[in-house]
Image: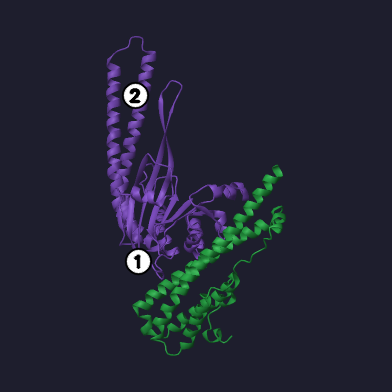
Amino acid sequence: MKNLSELEDLYHGRLKHNLSSLEASRKKILNKFLLSIFGAILSLLVLVLYFTNADEPNAIIPIVIGLFLVFCLGIFIMAFKAKKIYRRQYKTEVVSEVVRAVNPDWNYDPDRKITSSDYRKSDLFRRAYDKYEGDDLISGLIDKTDFECSELHTQYKVVTYDKNGRRKEHWHTIFRGLFFHADFNKLFKGQTYVTPDYAEKIFGKWGQKFQKFSGKGSLVKLENPDFEKTFVVHSTDQIEARYILTPAIMEALLRIKDEYKRPVHFSFIDSRVYCALSFNNKLFEPKIVRSGVKFSDISSMYHLFLLNETIIKELNLNTRIWTKK
Amino acid sequence: MLLLIIIIAMYNGLIRLKNEVDNAFGGMDTQLKKRYDLIPNIVESVKQYVQHEKDLLMKVTELRAQATSGTMSNDEKVVLDNKISASLRGIMVSVENYPDLKANENFLNLERTMNEVESQISAARRAYNATVTDYNNGIETFPRNIIARMMRLWRKEVFVIPEVERENVNVKTLFNN
């Protein structure tokens, strides 16, 4: 694994060159998008002005404008296709290089994602989804621990009808961000869930009353006050929850939360650990509106990919001194 | 009428807390029994190899016999369990001096199981402490403390990790007392 200064060397050595060669494509795509949008707006304006001001409307002018609109649409479609190619190049020439910098043995597939059955097995988000999207799957082995991680976005649909009976679809996010699962080093049969503690944060001690009835299984009260303030734990087995969440593991989960400063959910099911780190935006995607030749983009990508290492290291998953080998 | 309902609710609440404590101790007892079951296997596999720790093995066998005699109170069980914990750790430390034993697959499996059981016991103790804290809060806060006194429910002690578990094990001094 490369450290941050080695990553900087890699950036100046090869990645910057790759990014700079992609820069010409990016500018072309941006220009095409701008041209098509600007052209469409302009032609629509002209059309409106023409119809409001022309005393004797002439059929040729709307036809010409219509043809220009089709031309703009054509450019837009071309830009869209070019963006797809640009994205593919970015993933293979830049993102995969960053993954290799973190660990050369990991597999990276920009088009694949964590399977929906693994997502459901995690039981972290119980609301049924209508849309399941994701990409950037990384899988591999860190010492004895196998893992998978990808970006995921799950949404559910709400349909409403206005007073005229018109149907409207609203999409709501269930989870968006990085989803990770790995082999856990201890065997367990029950299910334990560690989720962000919103209720206690808002309602204080009264929130704890609410927590008793929310979540699957029963509420688990643990001894670490910082952990209790940050997370709420539910489990189907009180002893097993503590068998998994040892004082060291509680500290580790807090450190992971502090490292990424994003809402994070964990579940421990079927001797695997699942982790969902929420984000509001798409990750590992090339920028179109601004230049992509920026080390900060690469270093934040690297930091996100490091999540795999961080969880496995912090949770000490390679320590196999128990009955599970 | 309302007062009666409140009293019944408090009574039931306290009984529930008391039962949870008993249940948690039961959970811990199960784990302790697993360890008792493991001791003969450990002694059997270790004694073929070790030369100088025979008395250590005898002591742990004796402690196990006491523990499984079934005539002890919960508090006595706890005290005895601490002794067994310490002596088992003593054996594990002395095993370090016998590379042949450390390489024995059977012993390695036992060691893993032992680690497993120790972790489970530690988790069970923490679960017990959590229910005892809930129970103590229940019987000591007003107005439930009045009902609790009438029900003769008294404060229970949480598990304190004995000093010997926090220190490095000194095998020689362990069995001299």
Say if residue A151 shows up in the picture: yes
Q: State the quadrant of the C terminus of chain B.
A: bottom right
Q: Which residue is mark 1?
A: A144
Residue placed at 49% from the left, 87% from the top? Answer: B55
Q: Which amino acid is tagged 1?
A: Lys
Q: Which residue is mark 2?
A: A43
Label 1 to label 2, Cα distance in Å? 62 Å
Residue placed at 28% from the left, 26% from the top? Answer: A70
- Residue furthest to the bottom: B52
Left or right: B13 with respect to A89? Answer: right
Q: Using the rendered view, name the quadrant where residue B96 is placed.
A: bottom left
Q: Nearer the viewer, residue B173 or A293?
A: B173
Q: Using the rendered view, name the quadrant where residue A50 is placed.
A: top left
Question: What colour is chain A?
Answer: purple
Q: Is residue A107 above or below residue A319?
A: above
Q: Where residue A135 sits in the image (x, y, percent)? A: 33, 48
Q: Where residue B110 sits in the image (x, y, percent)? A: 40, 75
Q: State the quadrant of the N terminus of chain B.
A: top right
Q: Where residue B160 sits in the image (x, y, percent)? A: 60, 70
- Residue furthest to the top: A56
